[in-house]
C-alpha cells in the first residue's frame, strides 16, 4: 500500500491494518489481502453479527451477502439490531465474523490439538438501507450468496414483503483475515509418543436435492443444484 496512489474505481489490493484488526495472538496468520478476504466471505453461508444492546454484548448468527465492498444482512423490521441500525446516528457499531473450518488437527499432546481454519473479521457501523433499488439488489445478493443463480429463478419480494424486511449495510473498510493451515505442531520430545497424529479434513458440498412434493409437473432440477 505504501507509495501507491489509489483511485475510487481501483481500490487498494489490501485493507489497511488498524489496532482492532491486528491480532495479538499469532499475528503472522493475519492477512489484509482484499482478494483473500472476498474469497472467504463469498464461500460462507452464515456470519455472526456482534453488537452491544443495553450495555451487554449480543452475537447473532444470520445470512449475509456481498456486493463489491459492502456486506448486507437482512431480517424482520422488528429485529432489534436492524431496528437499532435505523434509529442510531450514524448507525449501529458492529463486529461481523465469518469462519470456515477446513480440518481437525490431532496432535500427540492435548495442548497442540487445533483446527485449520479461514476467518474474516469486519469492524464498522451498520446502516439501514432505505433506497428501494439498493434494497432489492441487496436481497438478490443474499439469495444468490446461498445458491448462485437462484435470485433469477425465484419470485422477487413483493411490496408487502419488502415492507416487512429490513436490510442493513456494512462497508468493508476495517477488515482482516486470519488463516491456520498446515500440519501438527507437536513438541520434539513428543514425536515418539504412541499416539496417532495428523489432519482430519472436513468437506463442504451439496447433498442430493429433495424436490418439494407440491412441485409443478415438468420442473426439472436446475443446473446450479447439480450435486458437487
Image (cartoon, grey):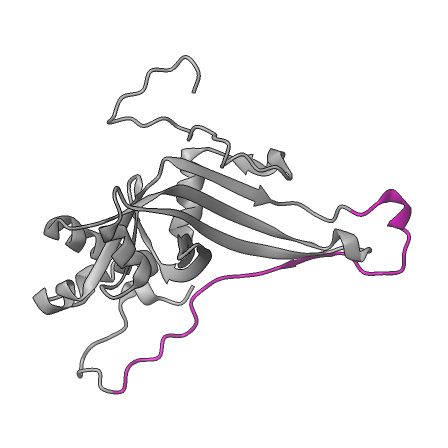
Instruction: Identify which residue, 210 or 135, lies in the foreground.
Output: 135
Q: Residue at x 15, y 50 (%)?
A: 130
Q: Residue at x 11, y 52 (%)?
A: 132
> Residue 144, can we see it?
no
Instruction: Identify which residue, 185 or 172, lies in the foreground.
Output: 172
Q: Position of residue 156 (x, y in %)?
A: 14, 64
For the C terminus, the quadrant is bottom left
Residue segment shown in magenta: 186-213
Instruction: Identify which residue, 81 or 30, lies in the foreground.
Output: 81
- Give the image quarter of residue 59: bottom left
Check residue 133 for magenta coloring: no
- Of all residues shown, which one is farthest toward the left? 159
Instruction: Identify which residue, 108 or 149, lies in the foreground.
Output: 108
Question: For the stretch drawn in magenta, what is the main secondary structure?
Answer: loop
Q: Residue at x 13, y 64 (%)?
A: 163
Q: Is residue 45 left or right of residue 199?
A: left
Amino acid at each position: 500500500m505504501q507509495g501507491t496512489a489509489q483511485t475510487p474505481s481501483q481500490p487498494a489490493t489490501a485493507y489497511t491494518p488498524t489496532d482492532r484488526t491486528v491480532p495479538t495472538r499469532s499475528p503472522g496468520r493475519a492477512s489484509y489481502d482484499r482478494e483473500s478476504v472476498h474469497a472467504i466471505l463469498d464461500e460462507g453461508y452464515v456470519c455472526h453479527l456482534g453488537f452491544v444492546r443495553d450495555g451487554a454484548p449480543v452475537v447473532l448468527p444470520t445470512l449475509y451477502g456481498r456486493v463489491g465492498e459492502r456486506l448486507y444482512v437482512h431480517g424482520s423490521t422488528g429485529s432489534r439490531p436492524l431496528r437499532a441500525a435505523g434509529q442510531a446516528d450514524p448507525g449501529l457499531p458492529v463486529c461481523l465474523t465469518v469462519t470456515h473450518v477446513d480440518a481437525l488437527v490431532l496432535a500427540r499432546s492435548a495442548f497442540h490439538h487445533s483446527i485449520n481454519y479461514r476467518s474474516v473479521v469486519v469492524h464498522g457501523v451498520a446502516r439501514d438501507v432505505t433506497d428501494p433499488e439498493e434494497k432489492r439488489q441487496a436481497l438478490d445478493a443474499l439469495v444468490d450468496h446461498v445458491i448462485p443463480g437462484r435470485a433469477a429463478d425465484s419470485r422477487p419480494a413483493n411490496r408487502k414483503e419488502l415492507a416487512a424486511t429490513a436490510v442493513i449495510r456494512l462497508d468493508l473498510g476495517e477488515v482482516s483475515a486470519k488463516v491456520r493451515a498446515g500440519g501438527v505442531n507437536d513438541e520434539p520430545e513428543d514425536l515418539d509418543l504412541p499416539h496417532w497424529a495428523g489432519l482430519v479434513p472436513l468437506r463442504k458440498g451439496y447433498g442430493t436435492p429433495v424436490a418439494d412434493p407440491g412441485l409443478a409437473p415438468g420442473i426439472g432440477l436446475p443446473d446450479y443444484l447439480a450435486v458437487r
